[in-house]
Amino acid sequence: MSRILATSGTEFRIALRNRWVAISILLMALFSVVLSAAGSSATGTIGVDRLSVVVASLTSLAVYLVPLVALLMSFDAIAGEVERGTLPLLLTYPVSRPEILLGKLLAHLAILTLAVAVGYGIAAAAALLLDPEAAAGLPALWRLLWSSVLLGATFLGVGYAASALARRPSGAAGLAIGIWLGLIVLYDLGLLAAVVADDGGLFTTKVFPLALLANPADAFRLYNLAASQATAAAAGVAGAANTIPLWASLASILLWPVAALALATAAFRKVTP
Amino acid sequence: MTPTLTLQCLTKTYAGQRALSDVSLTVAAGERVALLGHNGAGKSTMMKIILGLIPYDSGSLQVTGATAGSPEARRNVAYLPENAAFHPALTGLEQIRHYLALRGENPALAMALLERVGLGHAARRRIGTYSKGMRQRVGLAQTLIGKPRLLVLDEPTSGLDPVSRRDFYALLDGLASEGASILLSSHALTEVEARTDRILILSGGVLVAEGALADLRRKADLPVAFQITPKPGCESDLAAAFPLATPLSGCLSLWCRQDEKLPLMARITALADKIADFEVQPPSLEDIYSHFSKRAGQ
């Protein structure tokens, strides 16, 4: 445990020096401010409190931003050590490869949690300030917070796996961007096209819900929208959110971080210094 | 007492190429062993196998009584990589504190370690601003953490100036006298001459020579060079006395085998009244090294 903490302490310091802490907090804060400013005009008549609406908007934002920030922080984790030539020495220390990964994960997750908490905090404070009823949305906000952290952990793990597989920072960066585009943007577009083409057939009823659960970002969106019942604010997956039980999307967002870390460990074990 | 390091018939093949062939070796506690060889002779491969960083194909290997790369072995072994590299954003102090924590030692010892390698003044500067020699010292400082039973040092003196090099060997002497075994590599015999107990020469993955410097000198049996400076007017007399000698800028130069040394000396001293000066040149360290390296067909 002390080795994991030592690793995360050093990684946090490096992220601080490399401005990653500042960049991710600033990014999340900026988008949250823009979102609350843009969302404030359209609400008031829907019948739900302002914070619940903000949470629904933040969910859509987090689906894009949290994986992106996580992948940006993680792609260099192993490939960078290989390129700098620091990996061979590190691996002669009495520290196991899973311990190294866990140490990095802890540091990066702390930064991500900080960024998400600041961002959501700003948006929530604005909502609470303008709407006295907004406190009703606090449970939804809390749910969004911890599920965002789990989503971040998943994509950090995926980023470490990409980093170990690519072995060069440039390759790892390309792979990370590819993963982000594939899982966050193209995946949903593909599913949407398939659903339209299928026109209510077997794919839409059987495969589509499973396909949504299989993607950590979609499971995250499903869980938050279904749980907060703010489905009115969600467009694409709204219908599906109603047919998939809450426990299924919860299981997906809980299992994905474990699976991603296992994937990263397996990929890291294959790296020969 | 069990040896710190035992290799038996160790073989490693890279893509059909033999990187190490049947290498056997034992290093006792407190012994300083130098591993010499050209680039690509297999020195780094052998070190990485001993550290457990890369697997070997056949043979057996025991590091401090444990399997190479096992947690037990890693606790007892310190490594200095060739061209030691560290994260440029960290200071020397932070880096050493981190390594101390990974070995379960008190991070507060970091400053003392850096001072021991002469880096106390730069401890709070980022490693990105360090010179190559300074990074090498950070690397050296981390090998001193804890009480390693085996130090594996890959070309440790590259990038160090002669004074630092002497300090470095003094540091090693201290560690060896406390019982640590040292395996260090170099590509020049002159660098390790008097500072190691035993020398191994690796060539094309084969251990071609092993022993103390005196042993190697004897085994190589290289010719001894003599240079005789005749007194004015005695040149032709001496040339007649030593018909095999070649004239060289006013001197006579000749060679003899090790066992002919004394008889030749006797012949020279018999002609003392015709000789102004004479010198004996034993084979140099470089000669001995290239003799063993060449024998393996390089």
Image: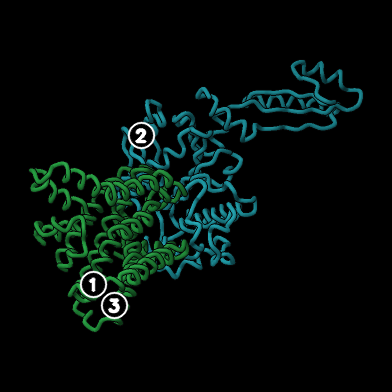
| Residue B293 versus residue A45 in the image, above or below | above
The Cα atoms of the two marked residues, 2 and 1, are separated by 61 Å
Q: Residue at the right extreme?
A: B233
Helix, strand or loop at mark 1: helix
- Pointer 2 residue: B10
What is the three-letter code of the residue carrying label 2? Leu
The residue depicted at 38 percent of the width and 55 percent of the height is A72
Where B215 sits versus B70, above or below? above
Is residue A248 visible in the rendered image? The answer is yes
Asked if the residue at tag 1 contacts the one at tag 2, i.e. Cβ–Cβ closer than 8 Å, the answer is no
Q: Within 10 angstroms of label 2, few (less than 14), some, or many (20 or more) residues?
A: many
Which x, y percent locates residue A214?
18, 50
Q: Quadrant of the N terminus of chain A?
A: bottom left
Alpha carbon separation for disc pair 2 and 3: 70 Å
**In the rendering, which numbered label is found on residue A127?**
3
Q: Is residue A52 left or right of residue B45?
A: left
Between residue B243 and residue A169, name the one nearer to us: A169
Q: Residues within 10 Å of mark 3 (few under 14, many from 20)?
A: many
User: Cα distance, mark 3 to mark 1?
Assistant: 11 Å
What shade does chain A have? green
B173 left or right, relative to A248: right
- The reply to the same-chain question for discs 2 and 1 is no
Q: Is residue A265 visible?
A: no
Q: Which chain is cyan?
A: B
Q: Give yes or no for contact between labels 2 and 3 (Cβ–Cβ under 8 Å).
A: no
Which of A36 and B30 lies nearest the eye of the viewer?
Answer: A36
